[in-house]
Amino acid sequence: MRKAHKGLLVILLAGLGIRICVSCYDSLYQVFFADDAFYYFKIARNIASGLGITYDGIQSTNGFQPLFLFLITPLFSITGKSLTLPLHLVALLQSLISIGTGIFLYKISRAIVDEWYALFIVAIWMVSPIVVDKELNGMETGLNLFLIVATVYYYSSLGEYHLAPLRFSKLSILGSLLGLVVLSRLDGLILVGVIAIHFSYSMVRKAKGGKDFKRLATSVGCVIGVVFLLVVPWLIFNYQVAGSIIPSSGQAVRYMSQNYGFAFFNFRFGTTQSSDLLYHIPLRFYLENIFFSFTKVILHLPYTSYVARVCYDFLFTHEGTSLLAKGVVRTLASLALVFVFFLLLKFLPRSSHIWKLLLVYSMLLIGAYSCYAFGQWFYHRYYFVIALMGTIWGGYLLYSIDLRLPRSFFIPTLFKVLILILFLSLSLLQWRQVVSDRHKNQNVLLHTMVKVAEQIIPQESVIGCFQSGIIGYYSDHKVINLDGVVNQKALRAMKGNCMGEYVIREGISYIMDWSFVLDTLFFRHLGEYKSLLEFTQVHKGFFHIYKIGYQSTLGNDE
């Protein structure tokens, strides 16, 4: 075994050891898993129990990414009624997937840097708590990243796209990988488009006649055809359940983002119809999303995360910091990141087309979420692949600096030792930061609210909740999701300003959530049935709980 391969094995085993420790942690479900992960767990448990693809046991849902759900459902089948054991198994599965990501990260990095810097990039990635936090969040994030890097590596291994015909098997593998990327997250369609255009451009540039163009059409058609065959069943299922090829989770996140944004900018909800919220979005809302996107990228790069987090917490949580100062800082940070992107683009080898492709993909991803899909609170997950790209580009920048150093007096060796100590030290500080923050995060408080609800709310009552992942998974009550992430009917009711009618029809007798969420997404969307409902607050705290009284009832016919 080569020395570099031994080094890679040591790094991967160390990274796996960290992730196994996290996976076996007793409070894993309170510390690392996102609240939305429990939607996956509840749906997987219902499928394993024979209830079908449903969150609440009543109606079908498409508020998930299918490939990850497909992988974790057997874990709930073999663990019976246990609530915690399958969660540890999910984390272990994600740990194994992360090792695959590390292997492809090394292979991709090795194409532009030497062995030492390729190992350095992998080491920084594998020990970073920011990375572990995202890979073991109980959702599709780590799986999606693994498939993206596997696809990018395979695509780059096809060579410079000369006109020698590629075998059908190679085109099918590329199409299959791209199809799996889409099934792991629907935004993988962006990568399909980028690779298809890049592949076509590379062949057209060298085409000399009709045969070459025919070969191009056949090759691209083969790849797209395989993607289509893999993805179309999922799109059909989406349309049957939600009337759209976009999962209800994506539609709900977009609509909630607009509502939160308009509330933040002090727009008048009382005089604004749902259609206005959908079609009349001010420019400053887009700009805020773009700035927030770049901020999130900086906060979640392994190289910059610790320092950026310290500065961010001081500037954006400190009471003495003015809104103007916050806006200036965010703008400067966004411009700085754009500058770094183009700086790295200039530094990269001119022949390395794959890195320009990745840069285009990154910018399109930011544009798609900043200007259409939104979901600012999820940007750290959506842009996880950009964090990996930033880690590669950062390693290449250090490698370029190393090449320009004097080759005498052990200066290059000293430089390597210093950057290794610096960034590993920052990782240790990040681990301390993550652990201290996690024990006071919202997941712990959500678990507390499960206990509060069990004490306050009668067993036969139906609970409506927007942040319903953890509460729906652990509560013995029937819990109905209200934000539409896994409930298309609730989303339609919210968009149609008829939440009051929906509550009555579903027999919801208690609602619980943050006061801001209830004010923005519920009380402002009750509609004409508002007068038929009476709300009595029975708990005030992290979540507010209201008992709903009915002055009248509706028939069951819709």
Image (spheres, grey):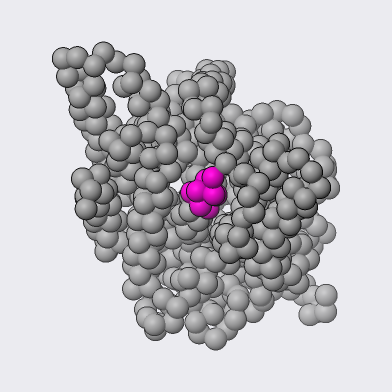
- Residue 383 vs 32, above or below: the answer is above
| Magenta portion: prevailing SS class | helix
Residue 207 % position (x, y): 73, 41
Task: Identify the image quadrant of residue 181.
Answer: bottom right
For residue 499: magenta? no
Q: Which residue is at the front of the view, 83 or 158?
A: 158
Q: Is residue 156 above or below residue 50?
A: above
User: Which residue shows up at 44% across the image and 32% down it?
Assistant: 393
Q: Is residue 158 magenta?
A: yes
Q: Is residue 159 left or right of residue 482?
A: left
Give x and y (percent) for residue 442.
Answer: 43, 51
Q: Is residue 278 left or right of residue 454?
A: right
Rendered residue at 32%/49% (across/down): 439
* Magenta extent: 151-159
Task: Name the residue furthest left.
Answer: 409
Please name whichever residue, 14 or 291, is drawn nearer the observer in this view of the structure: 14
Q: Is residue 186 visible?
A: no
**Residue 364 spot, x, y in % from top left:** 64, 38
Instruction: Name which residue lies at 73% across and 57% down.
Output: 218
Report x, y in % for residue 258.
70, 43
In the image: residue 418, left or right of residue 547? left
Please indicate, yes or no, whether residue 5 appears anywhere in the rendered image: yes
Q: Quadrant of the C terminus?
A: bottom right
